[in-house]
Amino acid sequence: MKVIIDTPEQVAVLAAQRYVRLLSQKPDAVLGLATGSTPLGLYAQLVRLNQAGAISFRQVTSYNLDEYVGLDGTHDQSYRYFMNHNLFDLVDIDKARTFVPSGLDTSQETAAAYDKAIQAAGGIDIQLLGIGNNGHIGFNEPNTPFGSTTHMVELTASTREANCRFFHSLDEVPTHAVTMGIKTVMQAKSIILIALGQAKAEIVKKTIQGPVTELVPASVLQLHPDVEIYLDPAAASLL
Ligand code: F6R
């Protein structure tokens, strides 16, 4: 794993450069995308670069990691809404080629079709990840089997509490989500994980320097041949 430590602003700039390089070599790349607070700086950079003509998403296909069960794409806390609002509506991407798991159809067939569609598109070139305080990637909570593909999960109390900040109350935070599995994530050709802030320091240490264990889902990334981990000094402070 390659670890890059810089200010949050520079992390966004450096990660965005990865996308500039990828899309100049492969304009029709397949991107695996994430939501949450962490990628906002990167998405702002990508929007800026797109508006400056330095990067184009016209031929890109994208697959998001996850979606809350019960929220449709018009709900302002759905991950589809987040992506439209923070990236897709602001760049030249063809929205018909942007995919987010359905929060309304949680059947196994639909989940399996998501993995099949990713493979049929040629596989993900760069999968972007944040990390939960408990080590989740996507919504793969601790103890998720490393062999898992896209599936529905019950969110842990700590994840619901962490994400409560976006809702009016804890009661409104969905109890379940649909997420790409660990295996789905690990099949990506390259992976970028970004972690910012002191609250992530302990789980970042376990991810990078701890044992590879299903108790820390992100630790599986130690087994992937092409992972870049972008940290700010606070998130890297225990390494
Ligand atoms: C989001 C996702 C989650 C977040 C993680 C960190 O699509 O899959 O794993 O990356 O919960 O969230 P933030 O960035 O809000 O700290």
Image: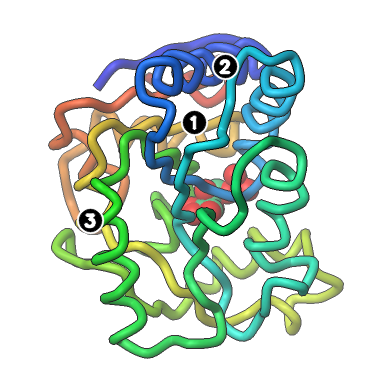
Q: CA distance from mark 2 to mark 1?
A: 8 Å
Residue located 61% across and 41% down the image: 93
Residue located 71% across and 53% down the image: 84
| The C terminus - image quarter | top left
Question: Is residue 155 visible in this depiction of the protein?
Answer: yes
Residue located 42% across and 45% down the image: 32
Residue 237 locus on image (x, y percent)? 49, 19
**Label 2 close to label 1 by CB (< 8 Å):** yes
- The residue beneath circle 3 is 119
Crowding at label 3, few (<14), some or many (≥20) Cα neighbours within 10 Å?
Answer: some
Q: Secondary structure beneath disc 1?
A: strand
Q: Secondary structure beneath disc 2?
A: helix
Front-lying residue, 171 or 94: 94
Decide which of tag 3 and tag 1 comes sooner along the chain.
3
* In the image, the residue with mark 1 has its CB under 8 Å from the nearest atom of ligand 1: yes
Q: Amino acid at mark 2?
A: Val
**As drawn, is 2 to the left or to the right of 231?**
left
Q: Amino acid at mark 3?
A: Gln
Crowding at label 1, few (<14), some or many (≥20) Cα neighbours within 10 Å?
Answer: many
Q: Amino acid at mark 1?
A: Ile
Decide which of tag 2 and tag 3 comes sooner along the chain.
2
* In the image, the residue with mark 3 has its CB under 8 Å from the nearest atom of ligand 1: no
User: From what the image shows, is residue 57 above or below residue 148?
Assistant: above
User: From what the image shows, is residue 174 above or below residue 86?
Assistant: below
Q: CA distance from mark 3 to mark 1?
A: 24 Å
Name the mark on residue 194: 1
Residue 17 locus on image (x, y percent)? 51, 13
Front-lying residue, 121 or 145: 121
- The residue beneath circle 2 is 11
Q: Nearer the viewer, mark 2 or mark 3?
A: 3
